[in-house]
Image (cartoon, rainbow, N blue to C red):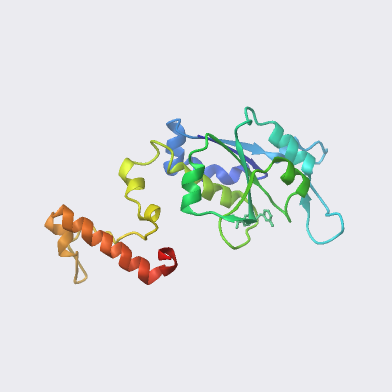
Amino acid sequence: MQFDVLTLFPEMFEPVKQSIIGRAEEKGLIKINLINIRDFSKDKHKKVDDTPYGGGAGMVMRPDVVYDAYSSIKNKENAKVIYLSPQGKVLNQKKVVELSKQKHIILLCGHYEGIDQRVIDEIVDEEISIGDYVLTGGELPAMVLIDSVSRYVDGVLTEDSTKEESFSENLLEYPQYTRPEEFRGKKVPDVLISGHHENIHKWRKEKSLEITKQKRPDLLK
Ligand code: 4G3
């Protein structure tokens, strides 16, 4: 799966190249291309933004510069262009799984007060938000999307870690325990030590339900 990221701050994506996602890229399972929008400014000062028509605070990213950066991406005929913005539909696990079936995703990261509406209307297929709060740019949301979607690309994670995952069944995770068997007077639940796989499965399912009722009853509705 290929991600092309249109951004003014490609250096922000450095940490993504580490960890599990970095490993997946080394294995050739995913590819992350960073496109610096500033490289497409024709201005001698490499300016990418300007004052808003009609007045008001802040700056707006110019449509021509963003469009030229987008145009530089090759073989984008079947790509889905996503704009990360607080006005988008809020990302959830169902959407993450749906996006993981795409071969090619282009992520547009905005800054300042936003991007000129005309280039958004011209190139964007879908507007997505990672939650109801405002950030200084779309880069962190783009990284959240890359990370969450890449987990579902074949070979990135071990088989059972995504299958067993409670969120795909709309339930929260059951509690996990490891050694020591006793910690500050607290014992690991007997059933987990019993080796009785059927009972363990039943216990975990019950715990998932109990925790979801307690912490996120909205997920059961
Ligand atoms: C566009 C996304 C981009 C318009 C981006 C601000 C939060 C999210 C930006 C705009 C962002 C989010 C950049 N902040 N909740 N900031 O996904 O007003």
Instruction: Tell me what residue is drawn at x 43 percent, y 38 percent.
Output: 153
Instruction: Tell me what residue is drawn at x 60 percent, y 35 percent.
Output: 79
Q: Is residue 116 visible?
A: no
Task: Give the quarter of the figure containing the C terminus.
Answer: bottom left
Instruction: Tell me what residue is drawn at x 87 percent, y 58 percent.
Output: 54
Image coordinates of residue 95 in percent, x first then y, are 51, 49
Image coordinates of residue 145 in percent, x first then y, are 53, 48
Is residue 202 left or right of 63 when viewed as pictured?
left
Residue that protrudes farthest toward the top in the picture = 75
Q: Quarter for ligand 1?
A: bottom right
- Figure quadrant of residue 173: bottom left
Count of marks placed on residues: 0
Residue that protrudes farthest toward the right in the picture = 54
Is residue 180 left or right of 219 when viewed as pictured?
left
Image coordinates of residue 25 in percent, x first then y, are 47, 35
Is residue 186 left or right of 170 when viewed as pictured?
left
- In depth, the one of 12 and 72 nearer the eye is 72
Is residue 211 left or right of 7 when viewed as pictured?
left
Instruction: Tell me what residue is drawn at x 40 percent, y 36 percent.
Output: 154
Q: Is residue 27 visible?
A: yes
Residue that protrudes farthest toward the front in the picture = 221
- In depth, the one of 190 and 168 nearer the eye is 168
- Figure quadrant of residue 171: bottom left
Image coordinates of residue 152 in percent, x first then y, are 43, 42
